[in-house]
Image (cartoon, rainbow, N blue to C red):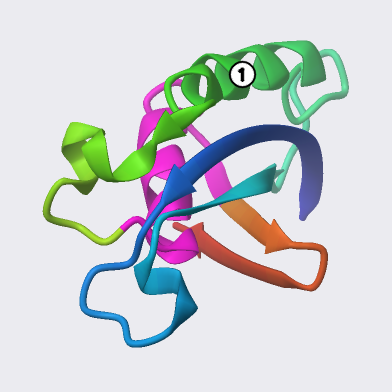
């Protein structure tokens, strides 16, 4: 299995509803996002897909999250904006253009991440 990966970042605020602890208050993170695409075979150019195209698609999604209160984004009005759900949100948007196996990981800190993959 071949894998390519691109990494980008966004900054945003959120609060976790129904959570007891510091994270129930509004706070922010500089999230690191990794998007991995997998393929059993390479295309005629010898690639899984073009890095530039994957990076562009990911960037368009992250613009919608950057410097936002994630709780106010329609997707997260009822769904808690946890790292797990943020990974799923990005994955669902990215999979519209990437027609291969995909994994999205969201790093909340340098030591904590959550992933969603198909």
* Image quarter of the N terminus: bottom right
Residue 82 on the magenta segment: yes
x and y, in percent, of residue 57 in the image? 57, 17
Residue at 78% x, 12% y is 52
Whether residue 95 is visible, yes or no, is no
Left or right placement of residue 12 versus residue 86 in this view: right
x and y, in percent, of residue 26 in the image? 41, 55
Left or right placement of residue 56 versus residue 20 in this view: right
Dividing the picture into quadrants, the one containing residue 96 is top left
* Observer-nearest of 14 and 47: 14
Whether residue 52 is visible, yes or no, is yes
Q: Where is mark 1, residue-wise?
A: 59
Dividing the picture into quadrants, the one containing residue 108 is bottom right
Check disc 1 and report its element: helix, strand or loop.
Answer: helix
Residue at 68% x, 44% y is 30
In the displayed structure, 118 sits above or below 53; it is below
Q: Residue furthest bottom?
A: 20
Residue at 68% x, 12% y is 53
Residue at 21% x, 78% y is 18
Span colored in magenta? 81-103
Q: Residue furthest left?
A: 78
In the displayed structure, 8 sits above or below 56; it is below
Q: Residue furthest right?
A: 46
* Observer-nearest of 5 and 58: 58
């Amino acid at each position: 299995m071949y894998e390519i990966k691109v990494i980008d970042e966004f900054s945003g605020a959120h609060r976790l509803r129904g959570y007891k602890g510091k994270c129930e208050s509004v706070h922010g993170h500089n999230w690191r996002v990794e998007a991995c695409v997998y393929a059993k075979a390479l295309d005629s150019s010898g690639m899984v897909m073009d890095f530039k195209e994957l990076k562009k698609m990911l960037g368009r999604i992250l613009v919608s999250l950057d410097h936002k209160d994630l709780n106010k984004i329609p997707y997260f009005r009822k769904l808690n904006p946890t790292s797990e759900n943020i990974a799923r949100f990005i994955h669902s948007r990215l999979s519209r253009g990437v027609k291969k196996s995909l994994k999205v990981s969201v790093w909340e800190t340098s030591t904590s991440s959550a992933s969603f993959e198909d």
